Image (cartoon, coloured by chain):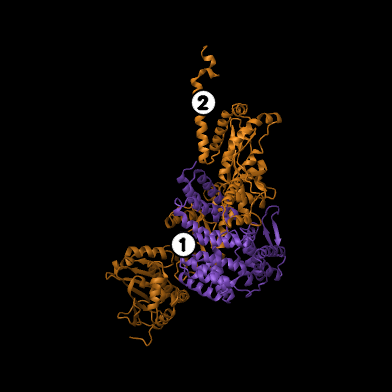
Amino acid sequence: MPTEAELWALLTEVDGLPRGSAQVSALERVIRHADARGLVGLGVRARLRAVTAYLVTSQANQALAAFLWCLHAHDEHPEELAHEVRVLMRAFTTAVTVPREFPGVPLPALREVSAEMERRYREVGYGPREVYETRFQDALHLGDVAEARTWFTRWRSEPLDEVSDCWECETTDEVDHLVGLGDHEDAAGLGDLLLARGIDCPAAPKRLLESLIAAYLELGRFDDAAMAHLRSYPQILDALSMIPVEHVSFCALTGNEGRGLEIVQRFLHTLDAPPAPGIAMGDAAAVAQLLRRVVARGGSRVTLHRRAWRDRPAGPVTAEDLLAETTDTARAIAAAFDARNGSTAVSGRVERILDREPCTDGLRLTGG
Amino acid sequence: MSRTFRVDLRGVVDLLSHHLYASPRVYVRELLQNGFDAITARRAAEPDAPARIRIDPPEVTGDGTLQVHDTGIGLTEDQVHDLLATIGRSSKRDELGFARGEFLGQFGIGLLSCFLVADEIQVDTLAAAGGPGDTIRWTGHADGRYDLRPAPVARREVGTTVTLTPRRGAEHWLSGSTVTTLARRYGSLLPADIRVGAVPVTGDGPPWLDRRRPSADRRRDLCRYAEDALGFRPMDVVDLHVAEAGLTGAAFVLPNPVNPVRHGDHRVYLKRMLLTERADRLVPDWAFFVRCVVDCTELRPTASREALYEDELLEAARAVIGDQLRGWIVRLAGTDPARFDAFLGVHHLGVKALALHDDELLRLVDRWWPMETTVGSLTLADVRTRYRVVRYTRSRDEYRQIASVAAAQGLPVVNAGYVYDAELIERLPAIDPSAVVEQLEPTELATRFDVLDVDAELAVRPFLTEAQRVLDPLGCRVVIRAFAPAALPAIYLVDRQALLDAQLLTAREQATGPWGSVLDALGDGPGGCRSGGEGGGHPGDWLPVRPQLVLNHRNPLVRELTGLAEGELVRLGVEALYGQALLLGHHPLRPTDSAVLNGSFLDLLTRAVSSARSPGREVGTGGEGEA
């Protein structure tokens, strides 16, 4: 049996492993041994690490179970886990994003989750910034823009604290939220500022650039949108477990359907095992948006290669068929969300994505 | 002579010296670039003009300054004004990058970069276009003041001399040894005669360009180059060419495994001048097993000239480089199996990462990569040929609990707990539609054991009931089967799904507030991913699959145990077998498991010792007294 030190070392090694089943097994091994020996601190650390590993391998229920185990362990052994409070509370910000993506979670539960987060943050002395952000995102999901704006303002006026990300990441979040609220001018302005600070780093803020694509397109800043796409797309790893929707959408809206198909082909298999219905919906809608353009350009017989999945053998699928499939998927999940929400906000959003006309045609993608 | 207009250089100097560069050392590169650009410009009109740059450090000049002489085209007075105007307008980094596109813009930015280390910069220049005696002198100061006048001493040769007076505290950047090191690092591939004092820093240009030599010699030279320049002896060298990017170079295959998550430090020259030693996006992610050295003409640098700008051309170049590396792998497998084997031994992770998406590479892994199996080390292709079905466990722990017993059944099982292996096995049908792959859950192994015949089954019933009562508190189910090897009394089998279910069950039991309904909602629908049908689970309910202790009826000790009447000894026996099975399968021991193991061991020992003390109860040694 491995010693405690070996188990901690194994946990460190996990970071060197690429995403996938080997990483998950290594974490499960640490968890099992830690539990058997009653090493609560190690169990917490390994589980918090596993939250993300499970989410990217589409095991949301295991991710949440791991997080809840930690929360419970913290309540049972507050002294022993005093040092883990910060990582635990940070993991909360990831965990609260999960229920929102599942239409089966009742609305009151969603509200109670953020209330519990608020209570726990207060108890351990953290500010409500992250809680407000959660409420902002919940409101945005429900289509209540006025409510979202209120929470956004409150979020922005709270100072950063121990559970916040670094300043740059938090500013990137701000850009992203501004895009979500439709304030494209403000989003682009803030993004420009951030880019001007660190523009020399070619590996710079990928997430920022991805958020800015939509804002730039809205504002007609097509060259900037192309720059944002070109600089952030190469930073996407093969192991991504979902469709890079910003990029697919960019291609659909700028007359770069060929490149869009290439991107969809690269990540097509992720449609089979999405991490959550909410993500499945967004991915399907983006793919459908692109395919609608492809078909409109006369490419309905264009084929993509699909890997085998469960009972479906590997083989080609036409743009036309995949368009129908993804459109149905996006609409079906949106309907489930609508039923839960008692509104048509989500399906409205999906329809807007599906119907969106290109902003420009034949935007050339050159660096200069 | 004072001019009618002046340009405020302070902002540019400030930008250049504080915000653009990571380190002052780039001033040497900027001076070399200026000198070389001037030579190139002059040679466009005068192909036979000399191509020399000499850097005299303070050790040579003797007056504390550093001087750079070039035989380039020189500047006229009007050009000096133009260049000042150009850079005076550049107040942002992007504009600087743009200004560099022009000869004068680059010259000015390069010159002002010297304020990283200098307080005063003096330029004496004689333009190729001007007549004799037209040498002009520009003197600039770090605070933005400058003036322009005829030089007191006329140059005899066309060209430029830049003189730097070091800033206090920056003298070490100008010392002969530092300048030699930096000039060599940045400029060693330039096609010009560059010296620091008398020491040459340039040689024969990029070592990969000379293609006339026999390939073995060339390879040897390139390997030697890698040892000098990169610090390792490569396993192999792959030539790189990307026409659109004007790129040539070589990829050196690392002799040791590297962390796939870390991206490589590649060395990039732009028109023969070193741009960076840390380019990380030059090759695709999977190609982490090479370090590249390339020279290019068309890729775009960032404003600081310390990295490549990410654009579509770089993306296209990366794709072509990926193709060339991939082509090399495929060729090597076809032509030199021994070397390919060695390569795979070191860099299988890179090849496997590529094989996740690339069918041809998957075929190579299938045919070449030996995997650990219960019937020895075999490639997946071997397993398929010999046994048709590829049966595998997804984790090393699962493999360890079943390996020896599966081997005894003659059941081939692949340990796919290593990085990417499970994913690759599951992708096998993509290259071979007839491939059958099956994930083996440990408890499925028990389904391959023989069940007892009805009489034997009935005979052991009372024992099993008792044994189950003993194991219930330990959360374990007991069954009895007959399997090889007979020497093994028991095996403990637990599925990953059982462990996961236990986690979910615990979470569900402990859930307070909203979390219960959240967990319920996550259990089904797309993304809920409770794969109920697989691995003997029970779809739709939350009853976990319990771990099993499988007793082996072929084992003599187990048979004895099943026939015992005494409850206490049955308890001890079952507990001891349970503990031993946990140890044999490398399972973690919970405190209750350890207690059971220790308790049964001590109790059995106590019994053995007390029976040794009362020989009357002893059975086997009866004959001894008679001997």
Nearest the eye: B420 or A98: A98
View extreme (bottom): residue? B4
Q: Which residue is mark 2?
A: B607
Instruction: Tell whether B507 sits left or right of B524.
Output: left
Between marks 1 and 2, how big is the CA–CA gap?
Answer: 60 Å
Q: Mark 1 is on which residue type?
A: Tyr
The secondary element bearing badge 1 is classed as: loop
- Label 1 lies in what chain? A
Nearest the eye: A54 or B265: A54
Q: Quadrant of residue B73?
A: bottom left
Q: Colour of chain B?
A: orange
Do callouts 1 and 2 mark residues in contact (Cβ within 8 Å)? Answer: no
Q: Colour of chain A?
A: purple
Q: Point out the image quarter for the N terminus of chain B.
A: bottom left
View extreme (left): residue? B62
Count of all numbered marks drawn on residues in the image: 2
Q: Which residue is mark 1?
A: A126
- Label 2 lies in what chain? B
Q: Does the rendering let one see residue A11?
A: yes
List x then y, in percent, for residue B192: 42, 68
Mark 2 packing: few (<14 Cα in 10 Å), some, or many (20+)? few
The secondary element bearing badge 2 is classed as: helix
List x then y, in percent, for residue B384: 66, 44
Nearest the eye: B180 or B523: B523
Instruction: Tell whether B134 sits left or right of B217.
Output: left
Nearest the eye: B412 or A20: A20
Q: Mark 2 is on which residue type?
A: Arg
List x then y, in percent, for residue B260: 51, 54
